[in-house]
Image (cartoon, grey):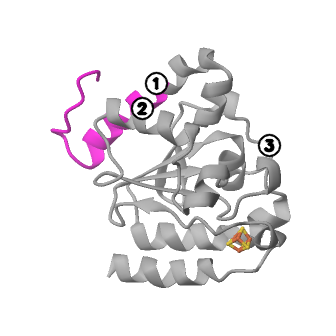
Amino acid sequence: MTTESLNELKKQVLACQQCPLYATRNQPVFGSGNPEAPILIVGEAPGFEEDKTGVAFVGKSGQLLEKILKACNFSREKEVYMSNIVKCRPPHNRTPAPTEQSACLPYLEQQIEIIRPKIIILLGSTALKAFFGASSRITRERGQWKNWFGYEVMPTYHPSALLRNPGLKRDAWEDFKKVVLKYRELVDKNHYCQYV
Ligand code: SF4
């Protein structure tokens, strides 16, 4: 049922022309991972590689994210589903405009309704602001559990920020360690992670 509902929604996204990003995209990037994943990861927007392949988080940022997830003993085949605030790549990877975000957010909200994750991880400032408002600050709010309509939400840095500024990696890892602990509390108390 979950997979069918997601596939139905994906068809709508693949045909979507609701904001100007449709004109410059190669293809929309709906999301990838286990449709019944307990963890949903939300980034900002597809980049060059994602736009080319149609798969979420496959570029350099995605590869770094995979390494972090592997250290947590999470994978997109099992524990994780990944998507973005907007499904189409903004030209030159610019931040999606507020009107583009509000046009696209209903798709993410429907993905959340279908997947019903136990934990949502928000990557970076754009994702945090889309959920908690424009006055939110990733540097101030990362690493703290927040509540969004009953969902447990952990904001942390976007992997692209970690690539630009490796000094942030230590903080991001502390945030993911908290996710492992929460996963044990809410999903699987026996979840193995050699670092936590
Ligand atoms: S970014 Fe979202 S709203 Fe805009 S065209 Fe793509 S799928 Fe539609």
Q: Residue at x 67, y 51 (%)?
A: 48
Q: Residue at x 71, y 59 (%)?
A: 89
Q: CA distance from mark 1 to mark 2?
A: 8 Å
Q: Earlier in the sequence, mark 1 or mark 3?
A: 3
- Mark 3, residue position: 135
Question: Considering the image in quadrants, where does the C terminus appear?
Answer: top left
Whole-percent x, y for residue 151 in the image:
47, 55
Look at the image and give the residue range highlighted in magenta. 173-196
- At mark 2, the secondary structure is helix
Q: Which mark is residue 101?
A: none
Q: Is 176 part of what is drawn in magenta? A: yes
- Mark 1, residue position: 173
Whole-percent x, y for residue 102 in the image:
76, 67
- At mark 3, the secondary structure is loop
**Mark 1 Cα within 10 Å, few/some/many (few <14, many 20+)?**
some
Q: Earlier in the sequence, mark 1 or mark 2?
A: 2
Placement of 171 over or under 123, stated as above or below: above
Q: Amino acid at mark 3?
A: Ser
Q: Amino acid at mark 1?
A: Trp
Q: Which mark is residue 68?
A: 2
- Camera-nearest label, 3 or 2: 2
Q: CA distance from mark 1 to mark 3?
A: 25 Å
Q: Residue at x 34, y 39 (%)?
A: 182
Q: Earlier in the sequence, mark 3 or mark 2?
A: 2
Q: CA distance from mark 3 to mark 2?
A: 28 Å
Q: Is 54 part of what is drawn in magenta? A: no
Placement of 193 over or under 135, stated as above or below: above
